[in-house]
Image (tube, rainbow, N blue to C red):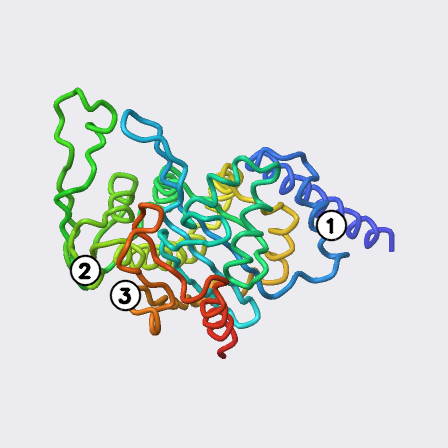
Amino acid sequence: MKKIIIAISSVIILFLLILFLFFLYISKKTSRPLFYFPNLVLKSINSPPPQDKLNLMILGLDRRNDWLEKTETTDTIIFSQINFSQSKIHLFSLPRDVWDYEIKTKINQIYPQSLKSPDKFTYISDKFSSISGQKINNIIILSTNDLKKLADILGGIDLYLNQGFKDEQYPNDAYIENPKSGAPIYKTIEFKSGWNHLDSQNITEFVRSRKSADTASNGGTDLGRIERQQQLINGLINKLKDSLSKKPSLVFDLYHFWSELEQNFTDQELIDMALKYGLNIRHLSIIRHPISAGEDPKSDLFYHPQKFINSQWVFIPQDQDFQAFKLYLSSSLEKP
């Protein structure tokens, strides 16, 4: 009997030692206190389960502070719903030039306006909730530099283009940094049909280019750029799932990257979702919903009125309260 007690005690001590070393390892890799994550896990276990739907606004920020321009506008604006119970991610990309009658400017100005608010995340959530008719749970603001960092962490992303594109009017960084340098204003970039490898050297060019053609169907204009951005998100998520399955330790690099992002998730929220839905993440499928934007006020959710509004080229919603867009969004989300 004494030997059994000693054996059981030894196993318990060994288990506790391994657990302590595991917590110590996580603490050092995440730069968090020793029992930071164990406490979050305990709180999560004793708390009600998280909701199975999460509404996000993903804003792509191309911050400029150079000789030519100073701006904080967001040229990428995506409403996303993650439906954990159905293992689906819904993506709706809004054109940056959509006019908002309430704020009397384009929606890509919502983020810079939020910087003057006491709580920028609440401001952004309120404005986009008003536009979408959906409660916005969280905000993610991704700059071009953030995108480069993520691409390098993942070892790049491979995307297949059915139709390549060539942009001969892509802004030249050398000219932007110093217009007096003699560098040309534009440079030529090209992505060929077929597989393209994106990393920190070219991923910004891929998502920013809009002068490759006069039509969206050929990859040009803001609408063509939106299509590529959605394709990139799809590729990023697939690469994330694949990379984590092959190299679980990558989660620490991703956590540090995530912690430095401009976003309003708490670690407790992340733990709650990981404990309940972590095993389902690899099964998430992405649904990209088209948003019609053109010149027909009857068929297009957002249309160009063939005239400037406040001296700006804009898209106008079918109605000032965005009711048509709200109906389209809600009905798309409700489909099985």
Q: What residue type is labelled 3?
A: Glu
Q: Mark 2 points at which residue?
A: 215
Q: How far apart are marks 3 and 1 (CA)?
A: 72 Å
Q: In this view, does 63 lie to the left or right of 2?
A: left
Vertical order, 132 against 250 (above or below)? below
Image point 18% across, 49% down: which residue?
211
Q: Name the residue under label 3.
A: 295
Q: Is mark 1 on a helix, strand or loop?
A: helix
For marks 2 and 3 on the same chain, the one whose residue lies earlier in the sequence: 2
Q: Distance between the residues labelled 2 and 3?
A: 13 Å
Q: In this view, does 124 lie to the left or right of 301?
A: right
Q: Which amino acid does label 1 sit on?
A: Val
Q: Position of residue 204 (x, y in %)?
A: 29, 43
For marks 1 and 2 on the same chain, the one whose residue lies earlier in the sequence: 1
Image point 60% across, 46% down: which residue?
122
For marks 3 and 1 on the same chain, the one whose residue lies earlier in the sequence: 1
